[in-house]
Image (cartoon, coloured by chain):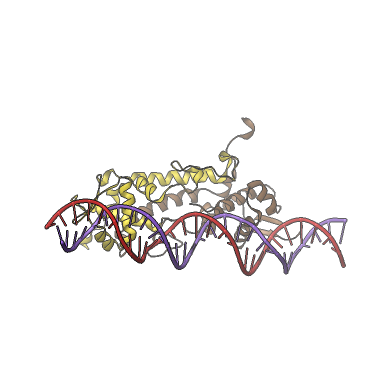
Chain colours: A yellow, B brown, C red, D purple
Amino acid sequence: MLSKRTKYGIKALAHLARKAEREPVQTAEIAKCENISHKFLENILISLRKAGFLGSRKGKGGGYYLMNPPSQIKMTDVIRELEGPIAMVPCVSLNYYERCEDCPDEAACSVHALMIQVRDSTLRVLGENTLDDIAQDKRKINSQ
Amino acid sequence: MLSKRTKYGIKALAHLARKAEREPVQTAEIAKCENISHKFLENILISLRKAGFLGSRKGKGGGYYLMNPPSQIKMTDVIRELEGPIAMVPCVSLNYYERCEDCPDEAACSVHALMIQVRDSTLRVLGENTLDDIAQDKRKINSQ
DNA sequence: CTTGAAACCTACTTAATTGGTAGGTTTAAT
DNA sequence: ATTAAACCTACCAATTAAGTAGGTTTCAAG
């Protein structure tokens, strides 16, 4: 399960991606539009800034802005930063690998092989999608 | 992340699948071979019995056995029973759907569309794999 | 018909994580 | 100087995960 933290973080990034101008956007605006607790969102955006996804400006008229074009931001990177490992089991994680104490032989583990397949298929989806892809509202709002 | 409960449950099922004979196997044996806490495993196997995956015999010589051939047990079913939803977000779950309170319009949600793709690719992998597939040790142990 | 081995059941515990909130400080534009 | 914003530290309540404890019931074998 995705944490709310991750979900909110993605929504906030998508919100910023939808703004053509690279003017800073206030957390208050994002929080209101996306129905996120203001304080909780602040905390998330600070992480995203520290991770290099966002820049910020303090003081009046300040806010957050994307450091890179949305088409260059892969969802794998975003999710790894916000949520941690993408793999469902640490012993198949590429970026957060950890051995299972209960497992004497990974190569012989029934769970291991299955979870590698799951990981790879998930990585493919998340690697193919950029922030630009998901920020677009695919529905034709004005034509319905 | 898969819970240990789910991981242990799968390992136990795989252990049973590897036994050609349909004789009951004791939790003590499974716990020892798979390095799982005996009491914790008992609790997991009771769930799997109640869910219809396992049968049991009480008393001396008792134990657990598979109710169906391993090739007919899909990993989607096993994981849904042990772990719950496969989707990363309740609003894209087929079997455990729940609306997000923060989201006024699912169809317009940036997270929603992405998570449908992830769900579908995961379902494909888990639906293609049966207990029989994962129970096999693919490595050629005797030939190395 | 007693003994032992097994499943089965109920309740508890301990630690970590999640999803926040509270209350401030610092920075910068006007 | 005022005000609006980011930023920081600390706390908190509820939930979940991963067990443990201590039994009861059932069944086979001697």
Give how far across and how far down residue B4 sits, in percent.
55, 52
**From this viewpoint, which residue is outermost toward the top?**
B144
Give how far across and how far down residue B122 sits, in percent.
44, 50
As drawn, is A67 to the left or to the right of D17? left
As drawn, is B136 to the left or to the right of D15? right
Residue at 34 percent of width and 59 percent of height: A40
Residue at 35 percent of width and 48 percent of height: A78
Q: How many marks?
A: 0
Which quadrant would the N terminus of chain A be assigned to in this image? bottom left
Residue at 34 percent of width and 56 percent of height: A43
Q: Is residue B52 visible?
A: no
Q: Is residue B96 visible?
A: yes
Give how far across and how far down residue B110 sits, in percent.
31, 55
A106 in relation to A36, above or below: above
Give how far across and how far down residue B22 sits, in percent.
69, 52
The one nearer the camera, D2 or A110, is D2
Which quadrant would the C terminus of chain A be assigned to in this image? bottom left
The one nearer the camera, C24 or A44, is C24
The one nearer the camera, B36 or A57, is A57
Residue at 68 percent of width and 59 percent of height: B56
